[in-house]
Image (cartoon, rainbow, N blue to C red):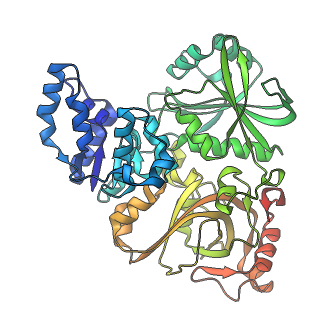
Amino acid sequence: MRILLDTNIFIYREQDRALSHDLAKLLRLLNELGAELVIHPLSVSELRRDSDIRRREVNLSKIEAYSHLERPPDPNNDTSFCELVGPAKNSHDAIDNALLYAVHRNAVEFFITEDRGIHKKAHSIGAGERVFLISEAVHDFNRYLPSREIIPTPPALVKDRMHNLDLRDPIFDSLRVDYPGFDEWFIKKAQEGRECYIHRRSDASLGAILIYKIEDEPIPSIPPLPKKKRLKIATMKVEHVGYKIGELLLKISVDIALRNDITEIYLTRFTQPEGDRLIDLVSEYGFRKASILQNENREEDVYVKSLCAREHDISSLSPAHVSQIYYPSFYDGDLVKKYIVPIQPEFHNLLFTDFSKGRQTKIYEHFGEFGIEGNTIRKAYLTHSRIKKIEPGDIILFYRSRDNKAITSIGVVDNVFPDVSDTDEIIRIIGKRSVYSHDAIERSNKPLTVILFRHHFHLPHSVTINELRRANVLSWAPQSITEIDNTKYTWVKQRGGINESYTVH
């Protein structure tokens, strides 16, 4: 495994002070894996420009312990890449682009950086699954270890009331700075019985929080947004990063909106110009800056997401982009193909931990823990099928074999990688989406086809094999990925109870 370290990781590691808990854990893990840690030549050049002579000499003396990335690819020769990441504003920005380009051109497998701006650019070029924060790397690289006791996942999200929270919790410190009068607002909303979702760390402090409100009123922004029933994300903050909790909180917000027949979600934010991880996350799922709120002497951005694509002009969007921007809505017209994908119960349980029918809970779930990847929106599925026709935007209907013997869930394909035989290459492709360990993939017969997809819905009514046979959708239980035509798909969608409001043709 070859991993590029950003300058900020290297400097933090080599400074004469105690390492953070996550970085110390990561370094032990990478050492156990025998990973090759490499530094980009431009990072070395950056260190040479340090005006602090003593610090410069110390860092340069230690850098020989690392491999240097020899003959790194030059992003300036790649016009399409430069257009995606935008022109470099300064020398530091140029270095960031060069480091990210090394990932883009597969000079390294993964890249670890705490620079939020690089993470934002990584998503723009489709490399977000291979660029890690320290905390994310600790969680994901654990899959490379031989089978052993599983690292405990963070406690599950719990629905609670604001009055049960401690206002002195450190998670509220930055909110108190950004929003004068935050304590008074919090107390008032607690007294109103406001609900929230929280995640607690092992020390009982808050690792994440979602406070929400259902509104039916205009938003007095510039320009003003008309009266409409909306779900407001009043507070969404994640301190325990690296476990996809932000994506899970967003999924919960969408679920709350759907249960309450709400088609629009919004939040307000003093956007951080140097990089804002929350805005980067919600932008991946269709939140767009719609207006500005005047808040005393500061301007607060208003980000809005529509859940119904049918309300908008989508003629310029590809089917895959409809799925991304208007999630959970999706395009299912004639431009995309539809497939039934058989999946064994044990893998169905891994991918869809929120599917309860016939699912036996794991022992750790009874102690308030859960499998993170199974609760997220973006997922990866591995199959022995040699099919090569599946494309981004296509519809996949998961058929749970053996016990349920029914179509249970529907998703939209992000990307497909057929006939992959190398275990490390498979792990690189699935990146942060994986629910599979390195050992499990290594033991699998290869080649495998990797399907990256977004999970949109569980069918309200699972469609059984007997129903499918009676309707001539299938002649027998599917043993491999099976394409069906639009007529059969439409029957499954209607029989399964998918709300037509969230599909466009």
- Residue placed most toward the observer, 294 or 51: 51
68 shown above or below 420: above
Q: Position of residue 143 (x, y in %)?
A: 36, 55
Q: Position of residue 334 (x, y in %)?
A: 75, 73
Q: Residue at x 81, y 23 (%)?
A: 220
437 shown above or below 256: below
Q: Residue at x 45, y 52 (%)?
A: 81
Q: Residue at x 74, y 80 (%)?
A: 485
- Residue placed most toward the observer, 186 or 297: 297
- Residue placed most toward the observer, 164 or 444: 444
Horizontal side of residue 217 vs 479, given as left or right = right
74 shown above or below 458: above
Q: Quadrant of the C terminus?
A: bottom right
Camera sees residue 227: yes
Q: How many marks?
A: 0
Instruction: Identify the image quadrant of residue 499.
Output: bottom right
Horizontal side of residue 288 vs 19, given as left or right = right
Q: Position of residue 218 (x, y in %)?
A: 86, 28
Horizontal side of residue 105 vs 258, given as left or right = left
Camera sees residue 141: no
Instruction: Identify the image quadrant of residue 97.
Output: top left
Q: Residue at x 72, y 17 (%)?
A: 294
